[in-house]
Amino acid sequence: MTEPTHEGEAHGGALGSRLNWLRAAVLGANDGIVSTAGLVVGVAGATDDRAALLTAGLAGLLAGSMSMAAGEYVSVSTQRDSELAALAAEKRELREQPDAELEELTEMLQNRGLSREVAHEAAVQLTERDALKAHASVELGIDPDRLTNPWHAAWASFLAFTAGALLPLLAIVLPPAGWRLLVTVVCVLAALTLTGWSSAGLGGAGPRRAILRNVLGGALAMGVTYAAGTLLGVAGV
């Protein structure tokens, strides 16, 4: 009876971790789309020179992807350090006061709906099997075997942002000059519809509001930067 409970928590944690990675990938791609689209559309308002558009788009893509990767690395490293510190403290408590820790685990399992007798038996068996893992899972919500890797997070963020940024960059430089803006706007709004739908699906929410927010936000970003670029172009800046 104890093993299914323990394994169920592990599978639930693994599923939650995968969903978090998927959300991060969708949001990273969304950021790449919006920020790069705003940048290249703004430059397109000032000039139709393909080299200038390509240079600006590539600079934005590299700066954005590196910034996202560095930020994700720092964030996840901080989280991992906190998890390791919590595991070290738990390991020390298990070594210094095993009886108190066993009672604590029993009470936590009892609070989850088990009777006192069953909770105590489950706590004993879990402790004999792997005391640290049992306490980490039940008490801390951490799986010691599945700590988040900051390098994985950084690479995932870098690749997601780059994938999103490539769309507006290619859309602005590949078509003929007269079609660039229209093609870019259409491609970006279509991509934002997809990422809005995906993020809503991952969160279990209705897609309409998420898509509307995404599309309106992207359209506003492109409109503002295009107007600014046009004004600067007219001013000869």
Image: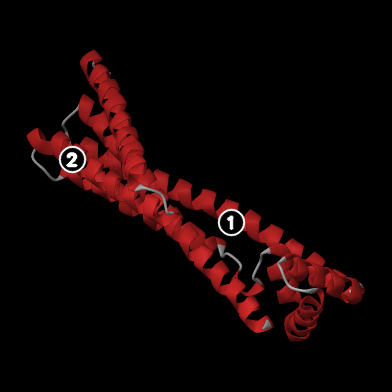
Q: Position of residue 134 (x, y in %)?
A: 72, 75
Contact, CB < 8 Å: mark 1 with mark 2?
A: no
Q: Quadrant of the C terminus?
A: top left
Residue 59 in view (yes/no): no
- The answer to whether residue 69 is left or right of residue 13 is left
* Dot label at residue 186: 2
Q: Is residue 204 above or below residue 103?
A: above
Pinpoint residue 151: horizontal percent, then vertical percent. Answer: 52, 62
Please name the residue shown 48% across and 65% down the image: 18
Label 2: how many Cα within 10 Å (few below 14, some 14–19, many 20+) = few
Amino acid type, label 2: Val
Dot label at residue 236? none
Q: CA distance from mark 1 to mark 2?
A: 35 Å
Quarter location, residue 36: top left
Nearest to the observer: residue 30 or residue 67: 30
55 or 92: nearer the viewer: 92
Query: Quick check: 94 left or right of 234?
Result: right
Which kind of residue does numbered mark 1 sit on?
Val
Residue 221 visible? The answer is yes
**Residue 116 falls in which quadrant of the image?**
bottom right
Instruction: Please tell me which residue lies in front, 237 or 232.
Output: 232
Residue where numbered disc 1 is placed: 76
Q: Dividing the image into 4 quarters, which one contains the N terminus? A: bottom right
In the image, residue 170 sits, relative to residue 97, either above or below, namely: above
Q: In x, y percent, where is residue 96?
A: 91, 73
